[in-house]
Image: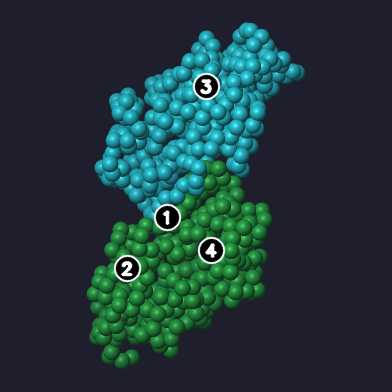
Chain colours: A cyan, B green
Amino acid sequence: MTDTNRQWHLASRPTGEPTMENFELVEADVPDPGPGEVLVESRYLSVDPYMRGRMRDAESYAEPWDVGEPMKAGVVGEVVESNHPRFESGDMATGELLWAEYATADGDALQPVDPDLAPVSTALGVLGMPGRTAYFGMLDVAEPEPGDTVLISGAAGAVGSVAGQIGKLNGCRVVGIAGAEEKTDWLTGELGFDDAINYKETENLRAAVAEACPEGVDVYYDNVGGPITDAAFANLNEFARVAVCGQISLYNATELPTGPRKLTTLVQKKARVEGFIVSDFQPHFRKATERLAGWVQSGDVQYKETVTEGFENMPDAFFGLFEGVNIGKQLVKVSE
Amino acid sequence: MTDTNRQWHLASRPTGEPTMENFELVEADVPDPGPGEVLVESRYLSVDPYMRGRMRDAESYAEPWDVGEPMKAGVVGEVVESNHPRFESGDMATGELLWAEYATADGDALQPVDPDLAPVSTALGVLGMPGRTAYFGMLDVAEPEPGDTVLISGAAGAVGSVAGQIGKLNGCRVVGIAGAEEKTDWLTGELGFDDAINYKETENLRAAVAEACPEGVDVYYDNVGGPITDAAFANLNEFARVAVCGQISLYNATELPTGPRKLTTLVQKKARVEGFIVSDFQPHFRKATERLAGWVQSGDVQYKETVTEGFENMPDAFFGLFEGVNIGKQLVKVSE
């Protein structure tokens, strides 16, 4: 532990694609934990697509971030000082903290991380928010049944890759859409997806989905939106369920995105489309994390991490999400 | 009974708005009922928006109608000859028959109509397919809860007017959108809607919905689609449910209708959008019809009918649906 602490602040709200101008690297003091609080030294920081929404000054399910203030992030790190009975120095903990090297939080808002269970970084990925998002979006929103065809956009990301494997565990034919051959190879070669489409190398995505899903699409788990989702909707079966997790292709839009109107399709197919936010499933987090951990230990769910080294590179890691740089969970490693 | 029988045939598939050129009035024989069949003389014929879809040669939940053949319609009429034990001459019956003065059907595919229960025309409206569509769309798809705000497009139509009254019976604040002052007056004055918006006299529909629904929209029952639906989506609450019954504003489109992409809204609001077809609720039709009949008898559900006289005017009655001519159920009266 040193007495210097760096933070990334939101310098300005992005218009369109975020750039370095929207971020400011600030030197701050290492904070003192108050009563009941814990001081955490960040080891891994998470960058996630939802953060783009927090940079916007618009009503959403969560408050926007303030300009001139440190941004928030999922963090896993080491407890270096604790005023909370549940944590001791040297413990590993995770929670929503800051884009910072050090941060304090109420100990009740942190979860302990067991380094013997799995690498601690998984607390931000397959055993953390993205894994749970895949879990609840598939099992509670999309409700796949054995024999269903499950189509997943953003399939090689932190959420999509887990969602697809949960589909396989539920006896489904699983097809992923991703944007690089390295990704589609990973999906079909290692994760057990039945097929995968590289949309960047596909002229007619609608036809490619039809070919990869010869019996149509019963479940579409959407992380992406836009034209990829148009192609998916064109292949929905009767009584299809669409779980809308994210729309990363639209998050940087500067004008209201438009596209084909889809509600007539929903009537014709008697289909259901449902958006969800993982935090609404909070009462069931413990069970979900336990099941995910079991699947990771058994090898039924595999995961990948793309790790950017160095706190100073956190905005770059964030930008990369919108370019599809990462395979699996994008993390920033801050300290050993 | 005469020995002449007129039928309307589909002469050609419409491009855009249907016109008289798409229809042909044909003289045919009065058919003889075969074994188990019943001959019905039409009294009222139903024209419905879904018929536009059957005129199209496109995959949907039902087969398209054939060019050169008589079109199908909901009919209530008198049994004039019966080879089925459930029906006698003089009985009133309803079922899916033809755009025709006389038609035969298997007696098992017809339902008896009790003229003492309600006017027989209601078998095509509030106690028929449109009433049941309102019933299941509200209670099984939209699932309103007491205190919810329910917004309905096409609110003065056969389906919307019943859907709104079912919302009131379930303790909701109900707001209707319709296209004429006579309609909005009926909704608020007689049907007990809490508010109604005449979209044709409204410059900013999104703001008008916000004003009429100060606590936001929990349930949106959509019969219309297009810009009216855009205004509704802009006012959805968290955990809103959208029941998509129809999209009449889009049925005559000659190009793929486009509009604002809505899935990001669904994520932010954790909202659900579900299309449905009433025939999927067939096992529950009897209960629904009984409850609707009870509400009609108690006055809890009121209805209106717009009756076009004369079989020869059936296409005109159909065209009127797309111009919003009708209040309540649009019928064609063929015989006394």
Q: CA distance from mark 3 to mark 1?
A: 38 Å
Q: Are marks 3 and 4 in contact (CB under 8 Å)?
A: no
Q: At which x and y percent is residue B143?
A: 55, 54
Tag nearer the camera, 2 or 4: 2
Counting residues from the N terminus, which is met first, the one under dot 4 or under dot 1?
4
Q: Residue furthest front?
A: A21
The chain identifier of the residue carrying mark 4 reads: B
The amino acid at mark 2 is Thr
Give the residue at mark 3.
Answer: A314
Label 3 crowd (10 A; few <14 / some 14-19 / many >=20):
many
What's under tag 3, amino acid-wise? Answer: Met
Residue to which mark 1 is pinned: B258
Q: Is residue A157 above or below residue B234?
A: above
Where disc 4 sits, the SS reads strand
- Of pointers 1 and 2, the one earlier in the residue sequence: 2
Horizontal and vertical percent position of residue A228: 37, 42
- Residue on which disc 2 sits: B15
Precedes in sequence: disc 2 or disc 4: 2
SS category of the residue bearing label 3: helix
Q: Are marks 4 and 1 on the same chain?
A: yes
Characterize the local packing of mark 4: few (<14), some (14-19) or many (20 or more) Cα atoms within 10 angstroms. many
Does the CB distance between marks 2 and 4 fall below 8 Å?
no
The residue marked by circle 3 belongs to what chain?
Answer: A
The disc labelled 1 sits on which kind of residue? Answer: Thr
To which residue does mark 4 refer? B153
Q: Nearer the viewer, mark 2 or mark 3?
A: 3
